[in-house]
Image (cartoon, helix red, strand yellow):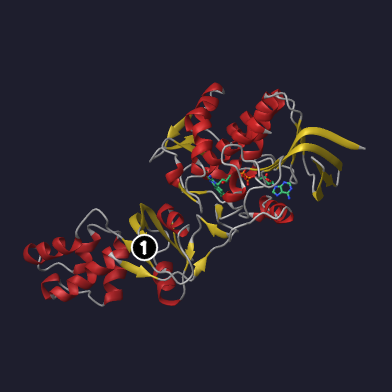
């Protein structure tokens, strides 16, 4: 017996839920298949449990993709204001943490409950703990064979997300489906992920574990100025997570530990009016104590400022404003927030999310080669792309 639907959506995450709701609103019969026992698990763990569900300033400029214009059409149809309206309709309280990032005041669970409520309103059939064994297409119908039976539909939406955090359900099924249907998939990398280091740099970071400060981190022409945290494995924090999406093996990153000040001018001034003070004491007025001392020890310039040469002050300046380090790798998919890359957007219509080569086959959310910066952009992409597919299935 084959269970027939208008639409089958694979993956009950942000994009799959949004797509199901929108298709349901258009009176389509929808079956949403999820292989884990939990709906929207990434939403639950996101934003430290408070879900940074969108960003006031989200636009295609906040995304990395082979085609940076791809997301424009979806944002034109459903943007952050549309999602904020939905959140308001459900009386979910939220606040702007910084830089347009909107978080739930209470809990990410409220976003999941809202999406489940909307699914129930549209009579979406959600099949949990359902694993897919085979997918085939005969004429214009897709057949999905699972451990719970076979389902068929004219429209199949792949919303399986990326590879990050496999222990809560991430899988490569979306990419496998793409390959089965001869679609190009770009190279995949863990992104929004802490960077790891070897030898000297690792020792330096380890000794400073727990210290955080505002820093500007640069690779080539791309810079992010946000928090940076020293850890036992290297460095993390928003600025590092952001730049990790631009990092490639063998590339150094440059860190400005005091982006708002000119440390050279300060040191020259101090040499005139605080001659007896140690360089580390002067630095610890502006930088965390332990970091100031570590820099001076590393450069072997731990002496009175009056005894320093211009050359030594330039060395300190260079370290503080242009600390250049070579990452050894990243912490990988076990901690990455997203997967960089995905199904090539050239394969997909940006106005419907339908595959150009196969009618009725749609891809939405993170499984596509559309990767947002940190700050609510990835969820906004999931809502926008899910909505657009839901309008067209
Ligand atoms: C720790 C963490 C924190 C994050 N915080 C934020 C944040 O605050 N703001 C933000 O914008 N983004 C955040 N992100 C990124 C964001 O969670 C994702 O970009 C977003 O969830 C992608 O939505 P999606 O629906 O495409 O995929 P997902 O939400 O990953 O959903 C995919 C669904 O498909 C299911 N699935 C996978 N394989 C199969 C299969 N074989 N069969 C059936 N079902 C399958 C999965 O179990 C999952 O339910 C965070 C990510 C992580 C890991």
The percent coordinates of residue 366 (x first, y second) are 59, 47
Residue positioned 15% across, 72% down in the render: 304
Which of the two residues, 379 or 107, is positioned nearer the viewer here? 379
Residue positioned 13% across, 73% down in the render: 310
Task: Say whether residue 292 is left or right of residue 388.
Answer: left
Q: Residue furthest left?
A: 272
The percent coordinates of residue 256 (x first, y second) are 30, 61
Task: Say whether residue 32 is left or right of residue 341.
Answer: right
Residue positioned 44% across, 40% down in the render: 59
Residue 105 in sight: no
Give the image quarter of residue 298.
bottom left
Residue 120 in sight: yes
- Considering the image in quadrants, where does the N terminus appear? top right
Q: Which residue is mark 1?
A: 220
Q: How many marks?
A: 1
Which of the two residues, 263 or 361, is positioned nearer the viewer here? 361
Residue positioned 42% across, 59% down in the render: 210
| Residue 345 vertical position relative to residue 31 in the rendered view, above or below | below
- Considering the image in quadrants, where does the C terminus appear? top right
| Residue 52 vertical position relative to residue 286 in the rendered view, above or below | above
Label 1 residue near ligand 1, CB within 8 Å: no
Q: Residues within 10 Å of mark 1 (few under 14, many from 20)?
A: few
Which of the two residues, 257 or 271, is positioned nearer the viewer here? 257
Give the image quarter of residue 183.
bottom right
The percent coordinates of residue 142 (x first, y second) are 80, 42
| Residue 208 vertical position relative to residue 46 in the rendered view, above or below | below
């Amino acid at each position: 017996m084959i269970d027939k639907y208008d639409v089958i959506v694979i993956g009950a995450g942000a994009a799959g839920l949004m797509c199901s709701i929108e298709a349901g609103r258009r009176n389509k019969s929808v079956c949403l298949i999820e292989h884990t026992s939990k709906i929207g698990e990434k939403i639950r763990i996101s934003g430290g449990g408070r879900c940074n569900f969108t960003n006031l300033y989200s636009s295609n400029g906040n995304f990395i993709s082979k085609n940076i214009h791809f997301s424009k059409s979806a944002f034109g149809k459903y943007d952050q204001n549309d999602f904020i309206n939905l959140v308001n309709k459900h009386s979910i309280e939220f606040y702007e943490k910084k830089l347009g990032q909107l978080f739930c005041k209470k809990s990410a669970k409220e976003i999941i409950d809202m999406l489940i409520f909307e699914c129930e309103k549209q009579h979406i059939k959600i099949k949990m703990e359902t694993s897919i064994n085979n997918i085939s297409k005969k004429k214009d119908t897709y057949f999905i064979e699972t451990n719970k039976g076979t389902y068929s539909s004219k429209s199949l939406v792949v919303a399986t997300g990326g590879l990050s955090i496999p222990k809560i359900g991430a899988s490569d099924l979306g990419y496998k489906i793409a390959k089965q249907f001869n679609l190009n998939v770009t190279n995949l990398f863990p992104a929004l992920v802490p960077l790891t280091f070897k030898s000297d740099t690792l020792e330096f970071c380890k000794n400073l574990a727990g210290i955080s400060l505002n820093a500007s981190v640069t690779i080539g022409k791309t810079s992010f100025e946000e928090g940076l945290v020293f850890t036992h494995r290297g460095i993390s924090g928003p600025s590092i997570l952001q730049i990790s999406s631009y990092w490639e093996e063998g590339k150094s990153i440059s860190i400005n530990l005091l982006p708002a000040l000119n440390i050279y001018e300060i040191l020259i001034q101090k040499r005139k009016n605080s001659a007896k003070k140690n360089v580390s004491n002067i630095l610890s007025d502006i930088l965390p104590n332990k970091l100031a001392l570590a820099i001076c020890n590393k450069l072997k310039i731990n002496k009175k400022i009056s005894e320093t040469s211009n050359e030594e002050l330039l060395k300190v300046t260079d370290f503080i404003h242009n600390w250049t380090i070579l990452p050894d790798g990243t912490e990988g998919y076990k901690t990455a927030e997203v997967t960089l890359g995905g199904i090539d957007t050239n394969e997909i219509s940006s106005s419907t999310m339908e595959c150009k080569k196969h009618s009725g086959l749609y891809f939405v959310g993170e499984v596509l080669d559309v990767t947002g910066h940190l700050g609510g952009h990835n969820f906004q992409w999931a809502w926008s792309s899910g909505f657009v597919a839901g309008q067209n299935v």
